[in-house]
Image (cartoon, grey):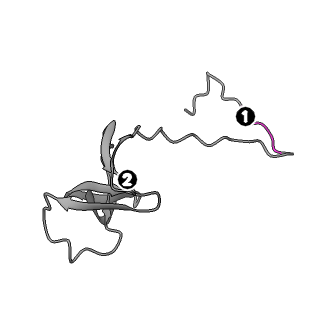
Amino acid sequence: MVYVGAEMKDPQTGQRLGRVESPCCDLMTDRVTPNFSYGRLENVRGQLDQLPAGALQVREQLKEVAVAKGAMGDAQAVTVAPAPPPRQARVTQQEGSAAPASVKSSDDKW
């Protein structure tokens, strides 16, 4: 898990570059139910009681197979596949809009 800190900006362009992320701890999931999961933080680096709400986020991929206790208390092998990459948004052409102009290979302005 990481602590999400202050936002960084490029000093010359003012472009937002994202937030500073610092490793803070490891999240160990103990029990998973259909609506809720129970876990604990291990290897904590720093004081967590002074962090604002929502400042911790998971940043590592999950392992292929994990063992979790189900709602009935019995151990179950749970297969966890890595999340698929996000799909790219489809670009649809609205009615009445013109097609994009083609760029000539001899265009000297590029």
Q: Which residues are magenta?
A: 97-101
Is 110 drawn above or below residue 9 in the view shown?
A: above
Q: Is residue 36 left or right of residue 75?
A: right
In-front residue for pair 95/71: 71
User: Residue at 33% of width from left, 43% of height from top?
Assistant: 62
Residue 17 at least partly seen: yes
Residue beneath disc 2: 70
| Residue 12 percent coordinates (x, y) | 35, 58
**Residue furthest toward the right?**
96
The image's mark for residue 101 is: 1
What crowding class fits label 1: few (fewer than 14 Cα within 10 Å), some (14-19), or many (20 or more)? few
Task: State the residue at coordinates (57%, 40%).
Answer: 88
As drawn, is 58 to the left or to the right of 103? left
Identity of the residue drawn at 22% across and 58% down: 22
Amino acid residing under circle 1: Ala
Q: Does the stretch in magenta take in 79? A: no
What number of labels is visible?
Answer: 2
* Element type at mark 1: loop
Residue 59 horizontal/vertical position (percent): 31, 50
Mark 2 element type: loop
Please name the amino acid that badge 2 sits on.
Gly
